[in-house]
Each structure stands twice: as structure tokens, then as C-alpha cells.
Image (cartoon, rainbow, N blue to C red):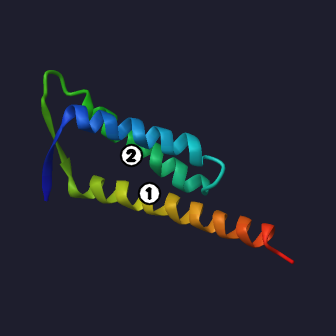
Amino acid sequence: MEICMNVELLKTCIETLKELRTRMHETVEVSVIEELESVIDQLERLSEVSNAVQVTVDSKLRMRVLEIIASTVKAASNLSEIIWYFLNDQ
């Protein structure tokens, strides 16, 4: 299933994913960062369609984005747990 997405909203999403990549590059596995970069590249190509107001994003790409977000949230959660245990170890 494909959905149409406003190009400006897509560009905002791309910038958010780039910020996520910057903040999480030392926290998550290299494979997650590589997948994130691949998805960003694909989304950027979609956003560069000349004179387009909306672009079509297929379900496979949308699922990849969600999986990457889940991986980074999981890594951040695990890291916060480790820090909590380290700081609260008595």
C-alpha cells in the first residue's frame, strides 16, 4: 500500500531522521546507522521530485523507517537502564 505525503512534511521528517542519526551514532549498532543512512538517502531522492507537492511513499520504505526508530528507541532505553543501575548501585 502506498500513501501520498506532502513534500515539505517529508523534508521535515528527513531532517528529524538526520538529527536522530547525529544524536544516536555512538549509541546504536553500526548496522542501524547504515540502515538509517540508506533510508534517508531514499527519502531524499523522493523529496527531490521537481515541482511536486506530494510524493508517493511505499509501505516497505515506511516500515523501514519505523523499524529504525524502534531500534534507536530500544538502544536509548537500554542505555538509560544501564546508567540507572550504574548510578544507583550500592
Q: Residue at x 13, y 35 (%)?
A: 54
The answer to which image quadrant residue 47 occupies is top left
Circles 1 and 2, Cβ within 8 Å, touching? The answer is yes
Q: Quadrant of the C terminus?
A: bottom right
The spot of residue 18 in percent (x, y) is 46, 38
Secondary element at image label 1: helix
Look at discs 1 and 2 and give the one toward the viewer. Answer: 1
Which residue was labeled with disc 1? Answer: 68
Q: Residue at x 66, y 63 (%)?
A: 79
Point 47% across, 51% down: residue: 35
Q: Amino acid at mark 1?
A: Ile
Callout 2, which amino acid?
A: Val
Point out residue 39 in the picture as x, y percentages from the top left corner. 38, 46
**Crowd class of label 2 (few under 14; some 14 to 19; many from 20; radius 10 Å):** some
Tell me residue 49's x, y (percent).
Answer: 20, 27
* Circle 2: element type: helix
Kindly report the distance in space between the C-alpha atoms of the residues bearing marks 1 and 2. Answer: 9 Å
32, 69: nearer the viewer: 69
Read off the residue under disc 2: 39
